[in-house]
Image (cartoon, coloured by chain):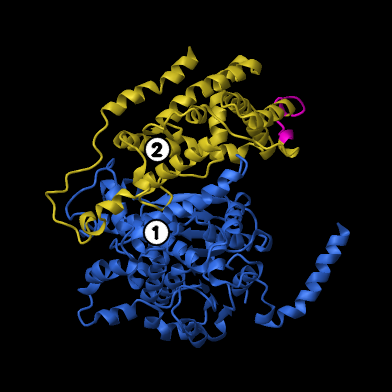
Amino acid sequence: MNRLLRLSLLLPLLGLAACSSTPQGDLSAYPEPTYSKERLVPDDIAQRDVQAGVYDPWEGMNKRIYNFNYHFDRKVFIPVTNGWRRYVPGFIRQGISNFFNNIRDVRTLANSILQLKPEKAAQATGRVMVNSTVGLVGFIDVATNMDIPRPNEDFGQTLGHWGVGKGPYLILPFLGPSNLRDGIGFLPDAYLQTELYGGFLAKPLRSTIWVFDSIDTRSKVPFRYYETGSTFEYETVRWLYSVKRDLDVEK
Amino acid sequence: MTRRCWLVALALLLAAPLSALAQEGYRYPIRDRWISTVVGTPAQIKAPLPTREEIPLRKRRVDVFPDREMPEALWYDGKMLYTVALQKQDAAPVMFLIAGTGAAHNGPKNLMMARAFYQQGYHVVSLSSPTYPNFVGSASSTGVPGHVFRDAEDLYRAMEVAWNDARGRRTATSYSMIGYSLGGLNAAFVAHLDSQRKTFDFERVLLINPPVNLYNSISLLDRMIENIPGGEDNIDLFFNDVLATFSAVYKREQDDVGFNDDFLVKVFQAFQPKDEELAALIGLAFRMSSGSMIFTTDVITDYGFIKPKGYKIGMHESLSPYRQVAYRIGFTDFYHEFFYPFYADEYPDMSRDDFIESMGLSSITDYLRSADNIFVIHNQDDIILAPGEINYFPAVFGNRAKIFPWGGHLGNMEYIENVAHMVGVFKQ
């Protein structure tokens, strides 16, 4: 029930998208600036602009969620991860991080099979088997010490592999940049991971495990909203995310 | 282990007399000024310093102008961001750090200096460049950065506000300051201002790879972008080429490859870019930061430069058209069509050329010549200096200027010998 509730959080987003406002104001009533787009950027050059090339019809809504994430980061997420780093000893944090990575390796295994990628499936299998046993249910990353590479595949990539396009760019609450395809792909991955936690965690831990997963993930990402030094950060992040996901699908 | 110790000791013994040969003994390995500027210092020969996790770095935000209302498009930049690392004991010397063009209080170069001087027992207060969008929005009195005297006043205020905000029970036994690149030029003018106001009475000031004249340096940086094949019209194709280069390396690596210095080195080894391409890359990086600065300045002042005057950009509005324009405006265009007209009224007796000349170290040469607490570290082959400008430093600062024979623009800043010299300035 709880799980269904969490997953259904995403659905209202799609509804919100429909009433997203137009992201460009009417400039015709104002005097022309010293350097206007009309004067400086001819249409053929504007069309080659790679950063504006990402399909983002929900920009208005996305920016609202982007700003929500900024506030959530500042008020909750970052203070919590700072405390996590300050008060939890390094080897315990590392152990917990390894535990989550082991679960994600199962996700990679499943998606490598779905994409018929035997090499990655074999690597992921080797990792999960070694880490779940010798590595004490994942707390010690023995596989990396044995130089087994760590592939990364998720259901968004699986959809991409079988030809599903990215769809519109989408900022997810709490999670950040995504697109419609990857946002939907997140659901089966999250379902699988939740089932796995259920496999070997006591009940009280099971319901809070996502919190620790998020803290662990966030504490390893140095990105801070609106602190990149670029006033055009939203577009640059959008562009880089899209390029990276295209590459991940190709790999 | 013991054997290795002996080897190191032997190497040090051999190296000692060599270092007496000064420049001939300089071991920073990259002699190409473009490569050093882009690649910096290889990890193995960086000065050993505490890591970021090992010192108590804290990011803080403070209201410099509490009454200022931010335009909607820049709603998030109302407070000034800065970084501090405070010693455990109350009384300690204070070190202010000023970042270079477009760089943040917590950029890698400022944090390297913070690590070095926290280790030396300083309370460290690290500030962004006055050209950093957050500084323009929150701490610039006019909103138009680049004016060396005004920027110095803004920085002075920012230093006072930041130290009072952060200090708590701490006391300063003395104050010192370092600025690198444009921050070095800023630091010289802050020191000049302090010689009148005396709030800090700086014990030592160090300028690392500063420009001599702002306009000369921005002209050089502007021209670098002309190295893009096919010229500025192809800036997007060049963007794509650079990205394709990174992509190719990314694709042949394992999935768990990280985007760090090692990755950069791999890209470098795979493609061995020509000097012209590196110059274009530096020009592009500079263009991206000047673009953000120009947009911020235009929105704050409502000058009507790339945004129509009077038009208020909404919080959720697309900024694409402004980015496209901003990335096609050189710093020199901004200088002539915005910066100079904006300030010209204050200087009715000055010609444009005189004004340009005044925005550089030459307008305080007499002060710098006699200020025996101001030191310089520079490189003979720095790419942001016009031909001959490097000679200004030995001529004015005498033996307070240390000129390394190569290292490009800040390429050798983290090199073990450079860091030793940087720290040494504050021990003399």
Is residue B357 placed above or below A170 in the rendered structure? below
Q: Residue furthest left?
A: A29
Q: Residue furthest right?
A: B3
Residue B367 covered by magenta stretch: no
Q: Quadrant of residue B36?
A: bottom right
Q: Which chain is in blue here?
A: B
Give B99 or B284, whichever is nearer the viewer: B284
10 Å crowding of disc 2: few (<14), some (14-19), many (20+): some
Q: Which chain is in yellow here?
A: A
Disc 1 residue type (three-letter):
Ser
Give A216 or A51, whichever is nearer the viewer: A51
Q: Which residue is mark 2?
A: A71
Is residue B54 placed above or below B204 in the rendered structure? above
Residue A169 is situated, as x and y percent measured from the top left of the image, at 38, 35
Q: Quadrant of residue A40?
A: bottom left
Check the residue under mark 2 and report the chain it is in. Answer: A
10 Å crowding of disc 1: few (<14), some (14-19), many (20+): many
For the N terminus of chain B, which image quadrant? bottom right
Residue B133 is situated, as x and y percent measured from the top left of the image, at 36, 56
Q: Are marks 1 and 2 on the same chain?
A: no
Residue B162 is situated, as x and y percent measured from the top left of the image, at 43, 57
Q: Residue furthest top?
A: A1
Q: Secondary structure at mark 1?
A: helix
Nearer the observer: mark 1 or 2; the answer is 1
